[in-house]
Image (cartoon, rainbow, N blue to C red):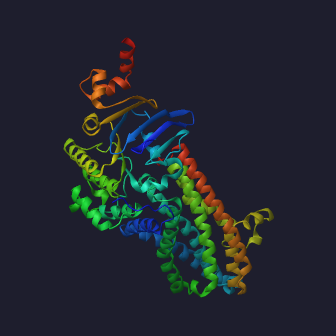
Amino acid sequence: MSSGTAIAVDQLVKVYKNVTAVDGISFALERGSITGLLGGNGAGKTTTIATIMGLVIPTSGSVTVLGTDMARYRHRILHRMNFESPYVEMPMRLTIRQNLTVFGMLYGVENIAERIGVIAEELDLTELLDRPTGKLSAGQKTRASLAKSLINRPEVLLLDEPTASLDPDTADWVRGRLERYCAERGATVLLASHNMTEVERLCERVIIMKKGKIEDDDTPRHLLARYGRRTLEEVFLDVVRGRGEAREAAQ
Amino acid sequence: MTPAPSIAYSPRRVAAMVLRYWYLLRSSWARLVELIYWPAVQMLMWGFLQLYIGENASFFARASGIFIGAVLLWDILFRGQLGFSVSFLEEMYARNLGNLMMSPLRASEFITALMIMSIVRLAIGMVPVSLLAIVFFGFNLYSLGLALAAFFANLILTSWSVGIFVSGLVLRNGLGAETFAWSIMFLFLPLTCVYYPVAILPGYLQYLAWALPPTYVFEGMRALLIDHVFRADLMVQALLLNTVLMAAAVISFRKLLDSARMQGSLLQTGE
């Protein structure tokens, strides 16, 4: 693993009883890079992300983040990471300010009140800070959740469908904020998404998974050229429906 | 600037979790009322029953307070465990467990916060009810003095051990195991002889009863209220058993958490 590697996944296998969720995948993400992790439902994306966070113990293989083995020493590094997913929520009865205060303390953030002020300003949440999280619209909740994921200014950010269920305008706004954060912080981002427009816009590299394996791994431009497609969505459909393999076989 | 690493046990993270539960309690009057409601109902029912029996049986007239004392101590045991488990379940209901598990919060810090909240919730519920017991029945729990401290310490330790074990079960098996949080302590009710002496039980059950720390507390309470003797020996034996029970609960929790990480069940915290 080079010193410029933020996340290294090596021969990762995860088997749940008789189901192989992740089947021997390997990849390394450079520091400061934004990578898309694509795949249909059940492709193994969530298990891969959960293993990177140390939430799942691999059956075999290893995951290191910023040089730390996540299966054994994840607590050494978790304060430098964060994640966001629409499938995990913040307590609804607590206000955004209360939630951010709690998570700020958990992540060891100094001057929490000041940090909340800054991040609320950046994410246009200042007026909403004292509103219970459960009373926010979907777009506001996503922004609040994003604020939680950025509260500790993470060096490594894992995003699981960060714009799911958002209208196009809000989704575009969220992508813009993410781009700005990554540019300013030099953060490494792994983005699992079904939104190909989002992946094309944000990611300089795309890893496509299918049935627990990596089907393809390249820049969006190279993928489009190789599959002879105009959009990443068409490439994705080729991969998940096996048309890529058929084309390769024919060639 | 990246936050400073806090790899070791962090009181600040414990405080963060206590603050989180305090915010929740403060935001919900229904949760606060519920903390007082059930202990008050129990205390009134057993108090009036004691009055009735005391008027018709000389033993109970002499041993005034054994039912109210028993129900108040039982509530420390039961509500202590519920206070621990319900705080944990709040994370499952809120779908917040993933956020916590992927944060730097350590299992030992989480458990400490749940212990603190168990005492906070117990205090909110039990202090007003113990004062009501003085008003309604002239039974002053605090007149037990240092004995009360020994009873409380042993009961709360047992309640935490059970709470830790149940939380591990829920972590491993999801909300399908939630029912244990509400019901497991009722297994202790007949076996720990809350309202009657151990000698009433059949011989084989007495062995089981004496393996449970609360049995020593309730026997100790009866010795104090009936014979006016503080049985320090019983409290020491209860403490020793509690030490074993707590160690077993912590080991079980760690194994269940590891199993949950192995099975990926932390990702599916629903039913």
Q: Is residue A73 above or below residue A110?
A: above
Q: Is residue B159 left or right of residue A115?
A: right
The residue positioned farthest toward the left in the image shown: A169
Q: Quadrant of residue B28?
A: bottom left
Measured as percent of width and height from the top left, residue A73 is found at: 52, 52
Pinpoint residue B134: horizontal percent, then vertical percent: 53, 85
The residue most toward the right is B203
In front: A183, or A130?
Answer: A183
**Nearer to us in this view, B233 or B19:** B19
Q: Quadrant of the N terminus of chain B?
A: bottom left
* Residue shown at 70% from the left, 68% from the top: B241
Q: Image check: A53 left or right of A72?
A: left
Tell me: residue B156, above or below residue A71: below
For the question of whether residue B192 can be seen, the reply is no
- B195 over A177 or under it: above or below: below
Residue at image location 29% in from the left, 27% down from the top: A222
Q: Residue A221: horizontal and vertical position, in percent?
A: 27, 29
Residue B255 visible in the snapshot: yes
Name, please, the residue furthest toward the top: A250
Total numbered labels placed on residues in the image = 0
In the rendered image, residue A219, in percent from the top left (x then y), is placed at: 31, 32
Pick whichever, A169 or A157, lies toward us.
Answer: A157
Relative to residue B154, is residue A211 depicted above or below? above
Q: Quadrant of residue A77?
A: bottom left
